[in-house]
């Protein structure tokens, strides 16, 4: 059945390229991160609904299935040591794409498909990162066509055609299930950001993820000799909309915007820093965000420490998640706000070192103790990003030299 599990030799070759380039303590983290992704990958002979492709689950200990944005993040990590395995993570969701263009939320190991809603649109960004390592034009063409269809879905079903801005939603008919589905599509589940509703909001990070999608589509189109003009036009329009819509002059901060009540949702979270990661912010606004960042320092919780709803053990109401923290800190780093960015990076890596058994789903933002599910894939992937991609441009290819297009 499944013969695509990475070999120990391929892993050792990758780690040997890192040896001596990282401190011993960072090399140890890298080794653990790689082996976390492998531990969550189906072994040869195991059958799953996505077989014969090898899927990297969020955690074989607690999450039995393939989740949409988890898959993208796991693929970014896997691209460092096995681009073909990384490619399969994207292809699993290309296989699952609906006629509408939607990429489903999750395919569970029992074959259940959750497809009333999706997840934040990061698959195209991940696919471009992978292509930079594998240079597989067949993969790129198939991915490009699927992401064109998905971009059309977001414009048609999530507000882009109407507003040139995007929101989360669900196709469920029951009102309660529809609202719950929109929360799940955001990936932020029970966040403080959604306490007054979600379908009435333009989330700042969603619109930045869509900008990343356009940036990826432009690169894919040019690589394939396709017309990129339409994507360039929409990318430029969204770039302007992000700066014109989400910047609050009064608070000197980026926030989600409630288009129904015409007001900002003034909960400061790592999402507020996404305009720095995608590069739309001016230098002046980036400096203002660096000052705001002190409210999230040192542990980069999922809502600022001073928010009245902050709960250090609340799922998305205070716990520290490495994916959103990375985007925020890397954005600050890219704008040369080095002191606060380095402080956050080093603390999160130190928390990973303090739990040598596993990388966890999330961490207590005060004590740094693990709180969520153990052996978590995207935490491992973003540990790799902190270690290997910290000084590179945000859309750069994996470093440490290029592994072969297939290590199998």
Image (cartoon, rainbow, N blue to C red):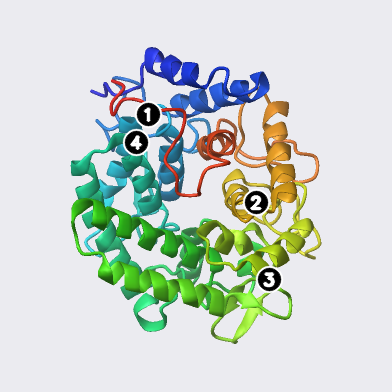
Seen in the picture, residue 247 relative to 59 is either above or below; the reply is below
Seen in the picture, residue 184 relative to 390 is either above or below; the reply is below
Disc with the residue nearer the chain's start (4 vs 3): 4
Q: Nearer the viewer, mark 3 or mark 1?
A: 1
Percent x, y of residue 56: 41, 34
Q: Residue at x 60, y 68 (%)?
A: 282
Marks 3 and 2 close (CB-CB < 8 Å): no
Disc with the residue nearer the chain's start (1 vs 4): 4
The crowding category of the residue bearing disc 4, from other C-alpha atoms within 10 Å (few below 14, some 14 to 19, many at least 20), is many
Percent x, y of residue 228: 26, 64
Residue 181 visible in image: yes
Which of the labelled discs sits on residue 402, or is there none?
1
Q: Can you tell which quarter of the image residue 388 is in?
A: top right
Percent x, y of residue 144: 25, 54
Q: Residue at x 53, y 66 (%)?
A: 280
Q: Secondary structure at mark 1?
A: loop
Which of the labelled discs sits on residue 253, or is there none?
3
Disc with the residue nearer the chain's start (2 vs 4): 4
Which of the labelled discs sits on residue 133, or is there none?
4
Q: What is the spatial separation of the Cα atoms under label 2 and label 4, in whole angstroms?
A: 34 Å
Q: What is the spatial separation of the Cα atoms under label 1 and label 2, in whole angstroms?
A: 37 Å
Q: What is the spatial separation of the Cα atoms under label 4 and label 3, in whole angstroms?
A: 36 Å
Instruction: Please identify the quadrant where the N terminus is shown.
Output: top left
Q: Residue furthest top?
A: 9
Instruction: Please identify the quadrant where the C terminus is shown.
Output: top left
Disc with the residue nearer the chain's start (3 vs 2): 3
């Amino acid at each position: 059945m499944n013969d695509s599990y990475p070999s120990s030799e391929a892993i050792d070759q990758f780690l040997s390229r890192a040896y001596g380039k990282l401190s011993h303590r960072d090399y140890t983290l890298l080794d653990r991160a790689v082996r976390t992704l492998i531990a969550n990958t189906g072994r040869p002979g195991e059958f799953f609904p996505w077989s014969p492709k090898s899927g990297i689950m969020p955690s074989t200990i607690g999450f039995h299935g393939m989740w949409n944005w988890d898959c993208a993040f796991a693929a970014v990590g896997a691209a460092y040591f096995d681009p073909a395995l990384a490619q399969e993570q994207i292809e699993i969701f290309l296989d699952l794409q609906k006629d509408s263009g939607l990429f489903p939320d999750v395919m569970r190991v029992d074959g259940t498909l959750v497809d009333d809603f999706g997840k934040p649109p990061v698959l195209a960004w991940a696919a471009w990162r992978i292509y930079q390592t594998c240079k597989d034009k067949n993969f790129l063409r198939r991915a490009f066509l699927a992401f064109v269809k998905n971009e059309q879905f977001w414009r048609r079903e999530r507000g882009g055609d109407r507003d040139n801005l995007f929101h989360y939603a669900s196709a469920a008919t029951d009102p309660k299930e529809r609202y719950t589905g929109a929360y799940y599509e955001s990936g932020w589940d029970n966040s403080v950001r959604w306490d007054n509703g979600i379908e009435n909001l333009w989330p700042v990070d969603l619109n930045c993820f869509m900008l990343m999608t356009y940036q990826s589509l432009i690169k894919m189109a040019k690589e394939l000799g396709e017309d990129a003009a339409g994507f360039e036009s929409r990318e430029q329009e969204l770039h302007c909309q992000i700066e014109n819509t989400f910047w609050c002059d009064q608070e000197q901060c980026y926030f989600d915007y409630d288009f129904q009540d015409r007001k900002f949702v003034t909960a400061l979270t790592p999402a507020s820093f996404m305009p720095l990661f995608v590069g739309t912010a001016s230098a002046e606004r980036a400096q203002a965000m660096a000052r705001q960042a002190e409210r999230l320092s040192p542990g980069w919780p999922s809502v600022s420490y001073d928010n009245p709803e902050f709960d250090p053990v609340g799922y998305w109401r205070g716990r520290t998640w490495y994916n959103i923290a990375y985007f925020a800190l890397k954005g600050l780093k890219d704008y040369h706000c080095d002191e606060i960015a380095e402080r956050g990076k080093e603390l999160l890596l130190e928390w990973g070192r303090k739990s040598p058994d596993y990388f966890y789903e999330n961490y207590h933002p005060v004590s740094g103790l693990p709180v969520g599910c153990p052996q978590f894939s995207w935490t491992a992937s973003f540990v790799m990003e902190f270690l290997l991609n910290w000084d590179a441009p945000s859309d750069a290819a994996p470093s440490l030299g290029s592994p072969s297009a297939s290590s199998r």
